[in-house]
Image (spheres, helix red, strand yellow):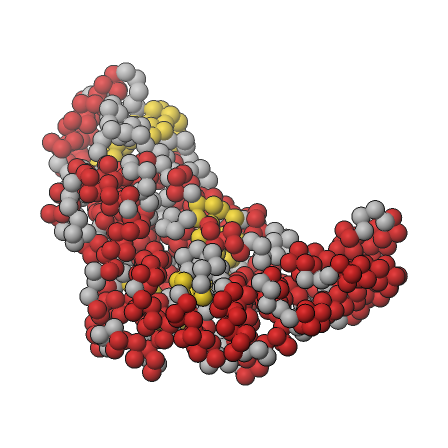
Amino acid sequence: MFEFQYMGWHGFQRLCITICREVFGQTVESFLDSNDAGMDGAFTGNWSQAVDATYSGRFVFQCKFSARPGHRITISELEPDVIKVQALAQAGLCDVYILMTNAGMSGRTRIALEKRLRAVDVSNSLVLQRSWIEEQIRTRRRLRMLVPQMYGLGDLTQILDARAYDQARAVLDSMREELRKVVVTNSYHLAADALDKHRFVLLIGEPASGKTTIASMLAMASADQWGASVIKLHDPAHIVDHWNPQEPSQFFWIDDSFGVTQYESELAKGWNRVLPQVLAALKGGARIVMTSRDYIYNRARSDLKQDAFPLLDESKVVIDVRDISEDEKRQILYNHMKLGRQPAEFKTKIKGLLEGVANHPRFIPEVARRLADPMFTKELDLYQYALAEFVERREQLLVDICSRLDDACKAVLSLIYMRNGRLESPIQLTDIEETALKRMNSDLGRVTQALQSLKDSFVVYVVVEQIACWTYKHPTIRDAFSEILRRNPELLNVFVAGTEVERLAQQVTCGDVGIERAVVLPANLFPQMLDRLSTYQASPSYKTTWLSRWGAKRTLYSFLATRCSKPFLELYLAKFPDIISSVQDPGLYLAWSPEVDLGCRLFELGLLPEGARSKFSAKVCGYALQGADALVLQDGRLRALVTASEMEALRSALLSELLPNLSTARLRRENEYDETDDSHQHMAPFRDAAEALRAEFPDDGNVHEITARELALCEQWELDHAQGDDSLSPRALTIGGQDPRYIGRRDVFEDVDV
């Protein structure tokens, strides 16, 4: 049932030691890969294999691996091990000899081995063959969790029950091949512990560090352990749309939660808006795994309400590729090469050089994936220097490889990029996309053929939010293609003309404004971008007319505020001057208001007229005076927009008008409560206003007395209106200690070409 032959001797040995530790309930000591004196593992104690079979004393384990399916071990193959065991027995170190193997053994060979061992003073021996090992894995979910590679090497219809198997398909569609190559690292254990404790984990790491692989392992373990329904989403805010209170065991997986290659502020703000419902889902039994590149998360932190959702910090697991041990790197490279697409001839030629690849300081798991795929090695010379360059210049080499693709393949990568990373299947082209493909010397037919040639190397067919689509095999391919766009003016022109405005606004900047990995449009493309923005009146992300227009406005304002240089904004205001009247009238709540960001940006660049600035200032100061929103006192950019005299007038009014009526502001907020809301989240605007008032007048005893009283009453009201029990159910997913580490001298790659 399990394809052990693909694991390699080193991976099989790790599996056997893990099984022994779980089954025997002992601390099984693992030994060096070579010069091990005939012991792959050992312990001293008792083991009751059955009611009438108890073994005691010093146990010695030996692992015999075969890369040949159906191979049967002969007594002659075992003779070198028997000689080593004889020395151990004579030294009093072996009372029970246990041989574990993925190969078969005939009854005659078994009897001959038993006689031979008795002749060298080993009184008890056991042979645990393939069927026994398979039974342990099949019946012990914890084992599969400790060695998740089994999910990729086994028949899941037999491992999982029917319900869990159906629900796991969303993961398997894109990750089955990757699960076959998994190597469990410390980051996986940390992530599993966080999921245990909080039902939530945020995986942070640099590009290609293994975040998605860990998320897929956790998804499979959840489907296996709890029969959890696995739902893969694009936007963290969509958790609310898919959460079913009647289905307590749901697993939500959101890759690149706050942007794929660049930070998308709307994703973070959307997450903030649904926090109460997300908390309710977690309390109801749902589990959530999110991933983000480290530099994107660092940008998102300022926009995320971490005080309202402390799990963002408590359950954050930072994956540092430098923490992967040398042994783990070798096993990662072995698994990819063994299970990759390279022919045996290539593997034989490169086998002696793989140790140097794994030991390279810039080695990451993505390097192993590329090296194992012929699509990435067509022009690679197999000698040490060339391989070192392959690892060292991994980003530039991928750009070069993408640049050398034929027109149809480049059109595929372009079309997926134009769709913001997800090309729905079956493909339905818009008129502007058809025009764009023609300019790239391609069409739908050639794109369809190219998809098949690129499948599982550059692109992959997946199901996201229950929608079938094509996406990049790895985000680094998107990185490389964005670099190609920057370098090719003609292709960049096609991209701007053929991409939907909403997607375009998430990927480009008009001028260089310092956003990492964004596609920077030069000044000669500003007029074209202005024309595209002039047509953007409704967002396709919303069904109702009102929400669609609101969504378009938010996207547009966010783009202008964060992704546009002063020269572009000057052109935009000249063409669309009416936008100023909207900016000067921001609505509640200011932290989420798109007008605030744009108004502050225009003011900083000297582009906000004085009349508009004055009206804007009056509006935000009025909110503070009502106790509805005191962001003007807390946000430096917003406060800078208010003149000194206006701020002095506001401070005076806060003491004379708001402070004496602070209880009225609290009661007004309490009366607006909807019982479906989270009480703590509902009262956040009042708490923020009271705390901002206290911070504004730190030496005023009267201010501190009144705000302390009102905050205490607010806290009591929140407790009285809290929704249910905040406690989580007992932990069920327990990883335990880390997998054994090996520091041997036997070559891990010796059978990679077998």
Q: Residue at x 40, y 75 (%)?
A: 528
Q: Residue at x 16, y 52 (%)?
A: 379
Check the picture and name the quadrant holding the C terminus: top left
Asked where in the image residue 14 lies, by quadrant, the reply is top left
Q: Is residue 374 left or right of residue 687?
A: left
Q: Is residue 468 above or below residue 178?
A: below
Q: Is residue 603 above or below residue 322?
A: below
Q: Position of residue 392 (x, y in %)?
A: 29, 43
Q: Nearer the viewer, residue 720 or 83?
A: 720
Q: Is residue 103 left or right of residue 519?
A: left
Q: Nearer the viewer, residue 40 or 455?
A: 455
Q: Residue at x 64, y 58 (%)?
A: 637
Q: Is residue 515 above or below residue 743?
A: below
Q: Position of residue 538 (x, y in %)?
A: 50, 80
Q: Is residue 619 left or right of residue 261?
A: right
In the rendered picture of this protein, how many numbered marks are placed on residues?
Answer: 0
Asked where in the image residue 118 lies, by quadrant, the reply is top left
Q: Nearer the viewer, residue 306 or 496?
A: 496
Q: Position of residue 51 (x, y in %)?
A: 38, 38
Q: Position of residue 293 (x, y in %)?
A: 44, 53
